[in-house]
Amino acid sequence: MSQQNNAQIHRFLKACRCQTTDATPIWLMRQAGRYMPEYRALRKDYTILELIKTPELAAEVTLQPVKAFDVDAAIIFADILTLPEAMGLELEFIENLGPVFHNPIRSEADVSKLKPVDPSESLRFTMEAIENTVKELDGRLPLIGFSGAPFTLASYAIRGSSREDLTRVKQWMYAFPEAWHRLMNTLSEAVILYLSAQAKAGADALQLFDSWVGILSPQDYREYVQPHMQLISDTIRSETSVPLIHFGTDTAGLLPMISALGFDVIGLDWRVPLKDAWKILGAKTAIQGNLDPAVLLASHSVIRRQAALIIDGVRGRSGHIFNLGHGVIKDTPTEHVSALVEFVHDYSKCNASS
Ligand code: 1CP
């Protein structure tokens, strides 16, 4: 069987299509990262940008959680902020502060300065990392590619630093609505090219991280974000058949609009019961989530109890991909991650009704 065929039949991809699976698939957002000793060891020698921009190292980091845990998908090691960097924003990851853009978007003129992106050139490192990883995975597991969604990218581009309050983003959006839409258009075009290139390089699914869009009211989402997301969804759909995953936090009030975008999978955080969300999303949409990452800091029995509640809550439905409601927290013990992955597989097999 070809690599592609092997990956196609994997339970993660089946669940993305709402097909029945032998067990609930699980992967974790930020499954590669500082909570893993293997990652910390590499970070002694390399900065995060060096890891991302060296395809062999990015592939190695991508595979670290795949080797350590029985997860059902790999996610390429990259960051949402390398795309705006390729567009001309100067990116630095500062220890204990996080990402910073040294020339953030302050004015309408700054939007015009953003450069168009050719991912096969300026983001070639991620395409090569995807190709290397697909080769290494050899069809055993599907690989997820990703991008930040335009709102979340704009939220970093405008603030410059994640220490700045997200309210500044709304302030800018209300003050300069035309410039806002131009910025969102420019980012959307880049996101489309970036995601298409990742699918061409071999990504089996694509996730859009709109991590901070939940700060918007439903009417502001409709006016300032939805048309741009619709364009991305429609264009990617017309170019590739890989499943599309939407992720955002605090999105309960936005779900009717997010649902209309036509993604295959909607990722949810812990603030909304999956059953309630599914009523809005409809049976044809798969759901990803939604254990609070803080639960992985608790005891094994708490982890098992909370994971069981999630699985019981959606029992009898196809199309559930177990994940955290946001990324793995840095202090998470790795044995808690193994225990969760094992429990989700075992418990969902025992309770299989799908
Ligand atoms: O070595 C380090 O400095 C560790 C921290 C780290 C890691 C592991 C950063 C800095 N980026 C990454 C990799 C990364 N980023 C992945 C890897 C793949 C995997 O999941 O294993 C992914 C998917 C991302 C995506 C990303 N970067 C998001 C969206 C997801 C989310 O968490 O909401 C965001 C918002 C970023 C920006 C970013 N990069 C890094 C940090 C600390 C942040 C967040 C800054 C903030 O607090 O706003």
Image: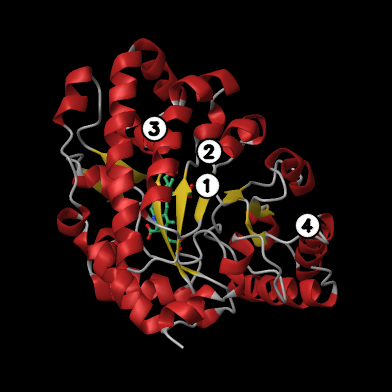
Q: Residues under labels 1 and 4: Cα distance? A: 19 Å
Query: For mark 3, what is the residue?
Result: 155
Q: Is residue 345 left or right of residue 94?
A: right
* Amino acid type of the residue that numbered disc 3 sits on in the rendered structure: Ser
Query: For mark 1, what is the residue?
Result: 246
Answer with mark 1 or mark 2, whichever residue precedes in sequence. Answer: 1
Answer with mark 1 or mark 4, whichever residue precedes in sequence. Answer: 1
Give the answer, above or below, for where 84 lies relative to 49: above
Q: Residues under labels 3 and 2: Cα distance? A: 21 Å
Q: Give neighbour class at mark 3: few <14, some 14-19, many 20+ (Cα, 10 Å).
A: many
Residue 46 visible: no
Q: Residues under labels 1 and 2: Cα distance? A: 9 Å
**Of discs 4 and 3, which sits in the foreground?**
4
Asked which secondary structure carries label 4, the reply is: helix
Q: Is residue 157 left or right of residue 317?
A: left
Asked which secondary structure carries label 2, the reply is: loop
* Amino acid type of the residue that numbered disc 1 sits on in the rendered structure: His
Name the foreground residue: 43 vs 219: 219
* Amino acid type of the residue that numbered disc 4 sits on in the rendered structure: Ile
**Of discs 1 and 2, which sits in the foreground?**
2
Query: For mark 4, what is the residue?
Result: 310
Name the foreground residue: 135 vs 171: 135
Q: Which dot marks residue 261?
A: 2
Asked which secondary structure carries label 3, the reply is: helix
Give the answer, above or below, for where 338 lies relative to 308: below
* Amino acid type of the residue that numbered disc 2 sits on in the rendered structure: Leu
Labelled pair 1, 2 in contact (Cβ < 8 Å): yes
Return the x and y of residue 171 as percentages of the image width and height.
41, 16
Name the foreground residue: 66 vs 162: 66
